[in-house]
Amino acid sequence: MQTIVKIYFYMLLMVQISSISFADSDPANPAKTKKPCGFPDDMNCFENKKVADADEVNANFKALLGRIDNINSVNGNIGIGTNSPSSGLHLYGGGWGSIITLSNTSTGRNWHMGPTETDYFTISQSNVGDWIAIRSNTGFVGIGLMYPTHRLHVNGTARSDQATFDTSSDRRVKKNITPLTGSLQKIQKLQPVTFEYIDDYKEDKESLDGKQMGFIAQDVKKVCPGMVTTTKETFGDQKIEDFHILNTSNLTPMLIDAIKELTAEVIQLKARIKVLEGKKNGCISEKSDYPQRQRQLL
C-alpha cells in the first residue's frame, strides 16, 4: 500500500509539472508569461521548455494539486486534510469513516479504509459490508464484522486445508482442577435442531444458506450456562445488546465424560446379565462371589 501511494503521488507530480507556478520571479526573465495558466494573478507562470532561475523556483503544491493541504517545509511531511502533518504522509478526515477510498469505475465497487469513532481501523466494501476490523486498544481482529470481541473474530465459516489450531493445556498453567461428572444427564437435556438463518443475518454469507444443524444458545444456557456468552450485534435494522454466543468446544469434554458414564453402566449390566444367566443354568449358588467380581470390573 505504501508503494502504491508513493507511485501515485509521483505520477501526479509528473502529470502536473508543466503547469507548475513559481513565485517572486524576475519580471525580466524571458521565460515568464502572462498567458492564463489556471493560477491566481499573483502567481507567475512559465512556458514549457523555458528555463527559470534557481531562486525563482518556489512551488506551491497546494495550488498545484488542490487536494494536498500542506507540505511541511521543515521536515518534508505531506498532509492531506491537515495543515500540520506529523508524519511522512498524514491523512486526516473529520468524523468517522473512510480516509482512503479505492474505486473501480467499471464494476462500481469502492473499498474504504480508515478509523471509526470507537478506536477501530476498518477495511470495507461499499454496499456489501465485507469488513476487516482491527481494534487498537484490545488487538481484536474481525473478519466479516465491524466490532470483533475476540482476538480473532470471524463472522461466517473459516477453512483450513492443512493448518491446525492448538490449545494450551499444560497442568502447570491451571488451578482448581476437579473431575468432570454428571455430563450424561446434561447431554440428555440438550436438544440438537435443524434450522435456517434469517435473511437479514446471513446477508451475503453464502456459507449460511440452506438448512443448518446445531443448537439454540438460549436453550443450552439453561442446561450449561458456562457454554454461552453474550455480546453486541447489529444486522439489518436490529441492534441487539445481548446476542448469544455458543462455545461448542466445551461439548468435547462433556461427551467424553458421558461416554465414560455409559461405559460404566454397560460393564455393570454385562456383569449382572452374566450372573442371571448363571443362575438360570444352575451354576451359581446364593453365596456367589458376584458382588466382588462386579467391583473388580468397575
Image: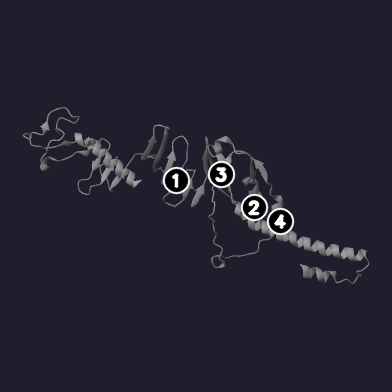
Could you give the CA–CA distance between mark 3 and mark 2, rounded to whole angstroms? 17 Å
- Can the viewer see residue 11 in this picture? yes
Q: Residue beneath label 1, please? A: 133
Image depth: mark 2 or mark 4 in front: 4
- Are discs 3 and 2 less than 8 Å apart at CB? no
Q: Is residue 123 left or right of residue 10?
A: right
Q: Residue beneath label 2, please? A: 224
Image depth: mark 1 or mark 3 in front: 1
Q: Position of residue 109 (x, y in %)?
A: 42, 35
Q: Residue beneath label 3, please? A: 243
- Are discs 1 and 3 less than 8 Å apart at CB? no
Few, some or many residues within 10 Å of mark 4 (<14, 14–19, 20+): some
Secondary structure under the numbered disc 4 in the rendered image: helix
Secondary structure under the numbered disc 2 in the rendered image: loop
Image depth: mark 2 or mark 1 in front: 1
The type of residue carrying mark 2 is: Cys
Image depth: mark 3 or mark 4 in front: 4
Q: Is residue 143 left or right of residue 281?
A: left
Residue most toward the top? 36
Q: Residue at x 78, y 68 (%)?
A: 297
The type of residue carrying mark 3 is: Phe
Q: Position of residue 32 (x, y in %)?
A: 11, 33
**Residue 35's image quarter?**
top left
Residue in the foreground of this view, choosing between 103 and 146: 103
Q: Residue beneath label 4, please? A: 184
**Residue 30's image quarter?**
top left
